[in-house]
Image: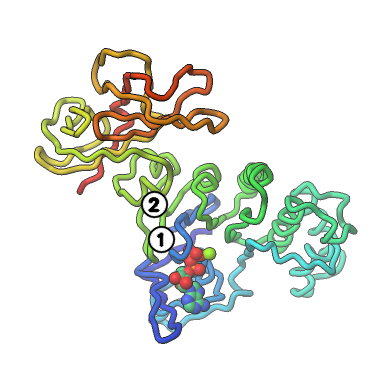
Amino acid sequence: MEIQIKDLNKNYFSEGKTITALSNVNLTIPPNKIFTLLGPSGCGKTTLLRCIVGLEMPDSGEIRIGEEIVWSKDREIFIPPERRGLSMVFQTYAIWPHMDVFDNVAFPLQVRNEPKEEIRKKVEKTLRFVQLEGFENRPATKLSGGQQQRVALARALAPEPKVILFDEPLSNLDAKLREETRKELRSFLSKLKITAVYVTHDRIEALSLSDTIAVMKDGRIMEIGTPKEIYFDSEQQFVVDFVGRTNLIEGTIVSIENDGPRIKTPIGEMACQKQMAPPIGSPVMVSVRPEFITVKIEKEEKGRNTFRGKVESLVFIGEAYEGEMRVGETRLITKIAPTFNLKEGDEVALQIDPKGCTLIRQ
Ligand code: ADP
Ligand code: MG
C-alpha cells in the first residue's frame, strides 16, 4: 500500500509557545518496502507517524493510504485509527504483562470480534512466523527482551495490516540484542510484502534496515534516498554529518578536469571524482569519510590526492583503530586496520580516494 503525504503541517502549543513539529512535509512512501524516517530526537518523527496512524491531528495537509484519503483538512476527512488498516509497534513494546503470549497476540483480533477458531489459526500462524511457536502459554513477563519484541511484532502482524509502523522499536534492547533483532526484523519484513514505516534516530539501524531513508530535521524532510545514496552522495552538510563520521575540509574549486573538479584546500589540491561541480571559484566543503583515506608509512608523498601527515592520536575500538592524522593545521579522522603497526608521532602518507570525496556547496 502506498502512502502519500501532502503539505502536512503540525504545531503544538505548550506553555504559551508554538512548537513546529512538522513543516510542509511531502512524502510518497512506496508500497511493500521498508521506509525509514531518520533524524535527531525532537525532529518530528513520532508526530509524523502518529499523524499517519490517526492518533494525532495535523493542522493542514492531506494523507492518503492506498486509494483512500484518511485525512484531509480541506475536504474535512478524518478516518479513525481503527479503520485505517494499520498496526504500530512502539519503543516500549506495550505488550500486556498480565496476559500470556497467545492472549497478547490474539487481543487485536478479539477486539474485532473475529470467530474463536479463526483467531486461534491466525495467532498460531503469526507465532510460527516470528519463531515463537510453543510459547503460547508463556506469561509475557517470562520472556527475554528480544522475545517480547517478537510478541509485539506478532501482535501487530496478526490482524494482517496493510501497513506496519515502528517507532524506535529496538531502543530498549542492549547493543548485541539490538543487532540480532535488527537482522531478524529485516528478514521478517522482507518476507512479508507489507509497507513498513520505521522511525529511528540510529543511523546504523536506518542504513542496514531500510530500502529508502528520509532524513528529517526540525520538522522537515531534508533528503530522501536509498541508504547508499544518503551515505555516499548527499550534498547537504547536516545529512552527511548525521549518517556517519566524516572529515569536512574547506576549499575553493580551482579547475574542472575531465574526471571532475580540483579543489584548493589547506591540505593541498584535492581531486574529486564524483559529481557535477559548482563553477570555478565557488567555495565548497569537501566531505571525505574515514574509510576513503588509506594510511601508508611513507615519508614522500606520491601520486594524486596523497598528503603527508603525522599521527596525532590512535584509539583502539576493536575492529579498527580510529586514527587522527594531522596535515598542516588540518586534522583528519581515519580508520586503520588493528594489525597495522603505527604509533603516535609517526609520519605517514594519506591517500584520499577521489571517488570518496563529496562536495557540499557553501
Ligand atoms: P521525535 O519523535 O523525532 O523525537 P516528536 O515528534 O516527538 O520528535 O516531537 C517533535 C517536536 O514536537 C518536539 O519539539 C517535541 O518536544 C514537540 N512535541 C511532541 N509532542 C508534543 C506535545 N504533545 N505537546 C507539545 N509539544 C510536543
Ligand atoms: Mg519519537
Residue at position x 37%, y 15% in the image: 297
| Mark 2 residue element | strand
Q: Is residue 202 left or right of residue 161?
A: left
Which amino acid type is marked by label 2?
A: Ile
Q: Earlier in the sequence, mark 2 or mark 1?
A: 1
Q: Residues within 10 Å of mark 2 (few under 14, many from 20)?
A: some
**Rendered view: 9 above or below 249:** below
Pick the front one: 215 or 285: 285
Tell me which corner region of the image, top left, top right, bottom left or bottom right, holds residue 208. Answer: top right
Q: Is residue 157 left or right of residue 289?
A: right
7 or 333: nearer the viewer: 333
On the rendered image, what quadrant is the N terminus found in? bottom right
Q: Which mark is residue 216?
A: none
Q: Which residue is mark 1?
A: 27
How crowded pointer 1 is (Cα within 10 Å; few <14, some 14-19, many 20+) is rated as: some
Q: Which percent across, then down, holds residue 298?
A: 33, 13
Pointers 2 and 1 in contact (C-beta within 8 Å): yes
Q: Look at mark 2 in the image and give the residue it sits on.
A: 224
- Inspect this view and state whether residue 45 appears: no
Tell me residue 280's x, y (percent): 10, 37
